[in-house]
Image (spheres, rainbow, N blue to C red):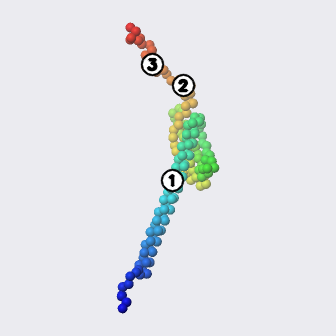
């Protein structure tokens, strides 16, 4: 006699297992793709932020601020990026508002924008600070030890 119940899996059980495994693999693949896209976007943002900060530091190091707008490329290594900077005078003498926008060179889509205020020290290059009042009065007082 052959037993009615034999060991093993039926075709329906195997197909259900494959279906569940397939759904899991599709979900995992979608999750990995999203994570890689987010990582690439983060890299673009970070590079654009460094380019913008570098432009502002270049302006600060040069020390010569002139009102107007300029733009340029970031070189062969960073061909994906294009920067634009705008320098405008504020009501405070010698203080300028600087805006640096970094965009995708191919699509023109803005990636990052950085705004700051920079002071132009050349405005006050001939300015001599007053002598410290405390020091000047100290020289004029008689020395107590010599009395």
Taking depth in this image into account, of 14 and 50 the one nearest to the observer is 14
Of the residues tagged 3 and 2, which is closer to the observer? Answer: 3
Decide: marks 3, 2 in contact (CB < 8 A)? no
Report which quarter residue 59 is drawn in.
top right
Name above or below for residue 32 compared with residue 75. below
Q: Position of residue 115 (x, y in %)?
A: 52, 43
At mark 2, the secondary structure is loop
Name above or below for residue 128 compared with residue 45. above
Q: Quadrant of the C terminus?
A: top left
At mark 1, the secondary structure is helix
The residues bearing labels 2 and 1 have C-alpha atoms spaced at a distance of: 46 Å
Q: Which mark is residue 42?
A: 1
Residue position marked by numbered label 3 in the rendering? 135
The residues bearing labels 1 and 3 have C-alpha atoms spaced at a distance of: 55 Å
**Chain-order first, disc 3 or disc 2:** 2
At mark 3, the secondary structure is helix
Q: Residue furthest right?
A: 76
Residue position marked by numbered label 2 in the rendering? 127
Neighbourhood count class around disc 3 (C-alpha, 10 Å): few under 14, some 14–19, many 20 upward:
few
Name above or below for residue 30 compared with residue 76. below
Residue for point 44% across, 13% down: 140
Residue for point 54% across, 46% down: 50
Q: Quadrant of the N terminus?
A: bottom left
Count every numbered label the image shows and give the total. Answer: 3
Report which quarter residue 107 is drawn in.
bottom right
Decide: marks 2, 1 in contact (CB < 8 A)? no
Q: Residue furthest top?
A: 147
Taking depth in this image into account, of 84 and 67 the one nearest to the observer is 84
């Amino acid at each position: 006699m052959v037993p009615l119940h034999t060991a093993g899996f039926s075709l329906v059980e195997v197909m259900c297992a494959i279906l569940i495994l397939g759904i899991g693999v599709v979900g995992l693949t979608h999750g990995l793709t999203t994570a890689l896209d987010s990582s690439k976007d983060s890299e673009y943002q970070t590079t654009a932020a460094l380019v913008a900060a570098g432009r502002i530091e270049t302006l600060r190091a040069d020390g010569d601020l002139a009102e107007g707008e300029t733009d340029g490329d970031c070189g062969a290594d960073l061909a994906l990026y294009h920067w634009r900077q705008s320098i405008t005078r504020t009501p405070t003498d010698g203080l300028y508002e600087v805006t640096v926008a970094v965009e995708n060179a191919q699509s023109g889509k803005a990636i990052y924008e950085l705004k700051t205020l920079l002071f132009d020290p050349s405005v006050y290059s001939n300015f001599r600070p007053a002598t410290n009042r405390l020091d000047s009065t100290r020289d004029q007082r008689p020395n107590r030890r010599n009395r």
